[in-house]
Amino acid sequence: MAVGIISDIHGNIEALEVVVSKLHELGVDRIGCLGDIVGYGPNPNETVELVKQSCDFIVIGNHDAFVANCYPDFDFVGRSWGIVTETTKDLSKANKEFLKSLKPKIRTADIIFVHGNPAYPRPHCIRDYLLADMELRTEKRIIPGTDPIQARCMSRYGLAEVFECLTREKRKKVFVGHTHLGFASKRLPIIGEPDSEENLDKITVYMIKHNIPADKDFFELELDPDSKYIFNPGSVGQPRDLDNRASFMVIDRNKATWYRCAYDYEKTMKKLSVLKIPDRYKERISEGK
Ligand SMILES: [Fe+2]
């Protein structure tokens, strides 16, 4: 069975339409969404409607939880609240209710789907980041004032903790979104003490931005049935790896494939230009950051 995985659409209907059409062309059997359906982009209602129509399972993202007021005392979007509020001001009551109904985690016999980090309970699992790229783990990515649990998720132990979580839960794969950066991380089966140097070396990371340059539009990874994996499909509506093409993935038996699709981002930027948000939130659509 081929399953398409999308995430972080952020109200960008132009990007979502291209991705859904590509997934249908690829003939996937099911589509799952890892959240952040709204926020930042100009078409929250249209995006929620198309996700509802197209996806077979959906988990809630931090922007969705903020807009739907799921946890009133919890700060889900930090400094972005003004932009998220402005770009979702026309979201219908029915669509807010729909977002509120979404679960933070979905588990199958072998897989966990979550927006942020599966190692943590709700609501932290919705908001906490799982960063996989050493070069991105710089101080500027750690927002001053974030609480210790979030800073911990940005530490170098993030991947190892998630693999431990998979072992505890007796599952082999987890799909996360939230960072807007596509990656796969593989951990070979552990032998002996889990914390030994030998076992720490068993984690490999594949960053999609390095594997899909501008002249390519997909990257295939053969999966080892005995290893555990963490996957991030990247972002449909607001990629942040300096490639403005929409990012998503398909998993089919022992193969994972990431795709990049060009879309009419100038149309999205034009719609954003009438909203009261800083210019950098409009320009990032074209810059992929
Ligand atoms: Fe997001």
Image (spheres, rainbow, N blue to C red):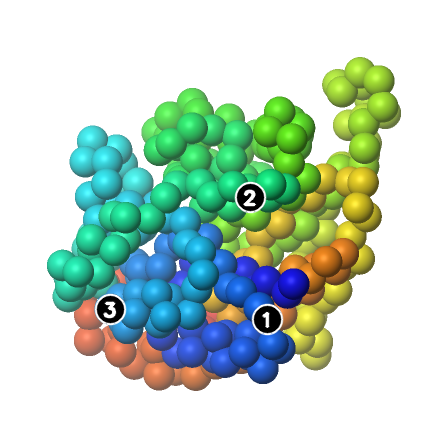
Secondary-structure class at tag 1: loop
Q: Does the residue labelled 2 lie within 8 Å of ligand 1?
A: no
> Label for residue 45?
3
Which tag, 1 or 2, sits closer to the chain's start?
1
> Label for residue 28?
1
In the figure, residue 124 lies in which quadrant?
Answer: top left
Residue 266, compared with residue 11, is above or below; it is below
Which tag, 3 or 2, sits closer to the chain's start?
3
Alpha-carbon span between mark 1 and mark 3: 25 Å
Mark 3 and mark 2 residues within 8 Å of each other at the beta carbon = no
Secondary-structure class at tag 3: helix
- Residue type at mark 3: give it: Asn
Residue 35, compared with residue 285, is above or below; it is above
Which residue shows up at 35% across the image and 29% down it?
A: 145
Residue 231, compared with residue 150, is above or below; it is below
Quarter of the picture containing the N terminus is bottom right
Left or right placement of residue 183 versus residue 34 in this view: right
**Is 275 or 48 nearer to us in this picture?**
48
Left or right placement of residue 76 versus residue 203 in this view: left
Alpha-carbon span between mark 1 and mark 2: 18 Å
- Residue type at mark 1: give it: Val
Residue wearing tag 2: 108
Secondary-structure class at tag 2: loop
Tell me, yes or no, if residue 207 can be seen here: yes
Which residue shows up at 66% across the image and 75% down it?
A: 217
**Is 203 or 224 nearer to us in this picture?**
224
> In the rendering, at what x and y percent does residue 220 appear?
75, 64
Name the front one of labels 1 and 3: 1
